[in-house]
Image (cartoon, helix red, strand yellow):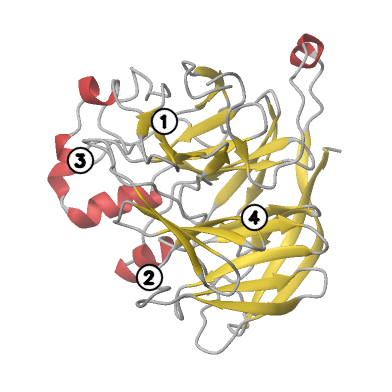
Amino acid sequence: MRKVAFVLLCALPFWACTSSEETAELIPQTLVKSDSVILPLPDKAIPWTTNLVYLDGESSWLFLMDQANNDILLYDLKKEKLQHTIDLQLEGVNGVGFIYGFQVESLSSIYLLPQGDPFIYQIDTSATLLKKYVYEEPPLYSEASHTSSHYSAPPLFSKGQVLVKTKFGGSFREMTSQMIQNGAMSYTIDLEDRAVKLSKHLYPKDYLDEGLRSWDLSMAASADQIVYSLFADHHVYFAEDTDEVLQKRLAKSKYIETFDTIPLKKGGLKIAEYLLASPHYENLLYDPYREVYYRFVIHRTTIKNSGHLIQLRQFADKFSIMVLDRSLRVLGETLFEEEFYVPNNAFVGKEGLYISRNHPELPTLDPSKMQFDVFVPQPKK
């Protein structure tokens, strides 16, 4: 494929960076709160979600996965109102099973990605099944993977094809440095003939040189580049096309000096502690309205007890958010330490970066509502 083959659904136009932009003086940025939004939840819904998708149109729409009821909730953000409930069917002619991740093309076209199955379902807002795409994942690779809550990677659709994130290899115990340098981070699926093709976006050859680490990743895209952020790598990796070899740019958090290695010999709890409480990078989000990227950084956390460890799966204690310009240069990093935000329940909209406040330790938490604070990058004073 040539140049920009894949465009993130709902992204705004984006023009290639010029050499003058590459050398322009950086203006330090910080994230500043600008607004708040409160959304009512239906009965039995929980104030945390696996997937959030923003759609700009006649109104500002937010699609929110209600996994407790297996529904997709459609909100009008401007009115702070639940506009419609998409009742996903488990079985029958419109059956899609349990869903955790999805992407939205329009109000009449929503793509569902079930976990564990090589399917992509296309539905509309009535939950009518329009099409079921069945494909075969390559050997040693997982099915198409996406939730916005953990290592987000929205599927990228263009001209009858879709680029999806995948997980390469098997368990931690099976992965080696030699294996991972030949592993692709994504593949394309042809929605017509279901052909699958690995991208040339490979893991860095030196990724495991200093020891075994998680190779989880997040993927984001503008209209002219695809960008990857890895769990334990200060660089971000980018290319204009799936057939191009990745380039890299240093985008180091000031809060991470070194990365831990996976404690394989210490058992499951210590491995879970490594994945949730050791310093690492998580979601990477692109903001087409301000033409910046947000790189989420999870800081080291001291585990208090087993309940605390379980809570970290959804609610990080301490994190920061880096702002990168469209050339992937670091503009700034904002620390969130004691404000009780939920970094894996965040999304980008026209008004800014929305971050959930539905943390269980928030004194004013109302579990019947989803509350988001809106942040925008501004020059640092």
Tell me how far mark 2 sits from mark 4, CA to CA.
22 Å
Asked whether residue 128 is in view, the answer is yes
Tell me how far mark 1 sits from mark 3, CA to CA.
25 Å
Residue 277 is situated, as x and y percent measured from the top left of the image, at: 39, 51
Amino acid type, callout 1: Thr
Of the 4 image quadrants, the one containing the C terminus is top right
Tell me how far mark 4 sits from mark 1, CA to CA.
28 Å
Q: Which of marks 4 and 3 is nearer the N terminus?
A: 3
Left or right side of 342 for 58: right
Residue 312 is situated, as x and y percent measured from the top left of the image, at: 42, 61
Amino acid type, callout 2: Phe
Q: Which of 71 and 181 is in front in this view?
A: 71
Q: Name the residue under label 4.
A: 347
Foreground disc of the pair 1, 2: 2
- Which type of secondary structure does the marked residue at label 3 adopt? loop
Residue 107 sits above or below residue 30 on the image: below
Q: Mark 2 points at which residue?
A: 98
Q: Mark 3 points at which residue?
A: 170
- Which type of secondary structure does the marked residue at label 1 adopt? loop
What residue is drawn where x is 82% and y is 63%? 35
Tell me how far mark 2 sits from mark 3, CA to CA.
24 Å
How many badges with numbers are in the image?
A: 4
Crowdedness near tag 3: few (<14), some (14–19) or many (≥20) residues, C-alpha within 10 Å: few
Q: Which of marks 1 and 2 is nearer the N terminus?
A: 2
Crowdedness near tag 4: few (<14), some (14–19) or many (≥20) residues, C-alpha within 10 Å: many
Residue 214 is situated, as x and y percent measured from the top left of the image, at: 32, 39
Q: Name the residue under label 1.
A: 258
Foreground disc of the pair 4, 1: 4
Crowdedness near tag 2: few (<14), some (14–19) or many (≥20) residues, C-alpha within 10 Å: some
